[in-house]
Image (tube, rainbow, N blue to C red):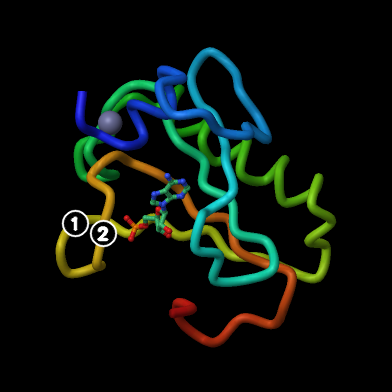
Amino acid sequence: MSCIFCRIAAGEIPSQKLHEDELVFAIRDIRPQAPVHILVIPKVHIASLWELEDEALAGRLVSVAARLARQEKLEQGWRLIANTREHAGQEVPHLHLHVLGGKKLGRMLPG
Ligand code: AMP
Ligand code: ZN
């Protein structure tokens, strides 16, 4: 198994999970682009939003992202990003949502 997020999901690579349920988990990004930078990741390997057809999973990903934003006290605002495929610069080919906040973000993506 070479996919980094599959290996984290399986516990092969230790990580501090901020959230875990039967469908998704969340970890802090190792190269944070903002004071709060969390990744919400499905446990099953789905390459990107392009391949996502499971609406229950889609709903869970977004609602967990919103719950974590509240937990991190991002009441002044935050951003949800899903880099999808090459033109968006997706680096890890396992679907993940970025939760970014804790400072005033630029008009577009940080970084
Ligand atoms: P993307 O460009 O949307 O594919 O972003 C991938 C993100 O995953 C980047 O922000 C990386 O810093 C982050 N990342 C890669 N490996 C790890 C890891 N082992 N733990 C936490 N974050 C990671
Ligand atoms: Zn994977």
- 15 or 36, which is in the foreground? 15
Q: Crowding at label 1, few (<14), some or many (≥20) Cα neighbours within 10 Å?
A: some
- 7 or 82, which is in the foreground? 7
- Which SS class for mark 2? loop
Q: Residue at the location (59% across, 18% down)?
A: 21
Q: Crowding at label 2, few (<14), some or many (≥20) Cα neighbours within 10 Å?
A: some
**Label 2 CB-ligand 1 distance < 8 A:** yes
Q: Amino acid at mark 2?
A: Gln
Q: Residue at the location (26% across, 43% down)?
A: 48
| Residue 79, image quadrant | bottom right
Location of the N terminus by quadrant is top left
Residue, disc 1 = 85
Above/below status of 5 relative to 33: above
Q: Amino acid at mark 1?
A: Arg
Q: Residue at the location (29% across, 39% down)?
A: 94
Label of residue 90 in the image = 2
Q: Residue at the location (68% across, 35% down)?
A: 18
